[in-house]
Amino acid sequence: MKLRYILAGRSLILDSGLCIGCGLCADVCPHAVFSLGAGKAAISDRGACMECGACMRNCPVDAIKVKTGEGCAASVIIGILSGKPGCGCDSDSGCC
């Protein structure tokens, strides 16, 4: 089963002009959001992005931008830490 996140990857931006095709984004992404082809990275599954920021932090040329803490995963973590597990959305939205 492949995980999907509400508003997944909405802040994820890949500047292919800056990309050098090193593949670090694909290596560190826990949900295989990126693929490599023709010497460049591409966003192949935006819906799987949980906006953790691993790709951005590991990109040596700053070709990736993402607002960490924007995605559903961050909301789940905040909910657990605050004692109110869940992402805070209603059950009809299909979140997590």
Image (spheres, grey):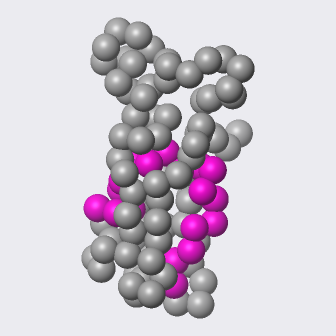
Above/below status of 22 relative to 76? below
Q: How many marks?
A: 0
- Of residues 49 and 7, the one nearer the viewer is 7
Identify the residue shown where x is 45% and y is 87%: 17
The answer, for residue 27, to whether it is visible in the render is no
Compared across the picture, whether 62 is left or right of 71 comes to: left
Residue 73 at x, y percent in the picture: 46, 35
Compared across the picture, whether 94 is left or right of 50 comes to: right
| Residue 38 falls within the magenta-colored stretch | no
Above/below status of 49 relative to 19? above
The answer, for residue 32, to whether it is visible in the render is yes
Residue 56 at x, y percent in the picture: 34, 63
Compared across the picture, whether 92 is left or right of 21 comes to: right
- Of residues 5 and 24, the one nearer the viewer is 5
Above/below status of 87 relative to 39? above
Identify the residue shown where x is 36% and y is 40%: 69
Residue 76 at x, y percent in the picture: 44, 26
- Of residues 57 and 90, the one nearer the viewer is 90
Q: Give the quadrant of the C terminus.
A: top right
Identify the residue shown where x is 41% and y is 10%: 84
Q: Residue furthest bottom?
A: 38
Residue 74 at x, y percent in the picture: 40, 34
Identify the residue shown where x is 71% and y is 39%: 1
Give, as a single range, the part of the protein colored magenta.
Answer: 40-57
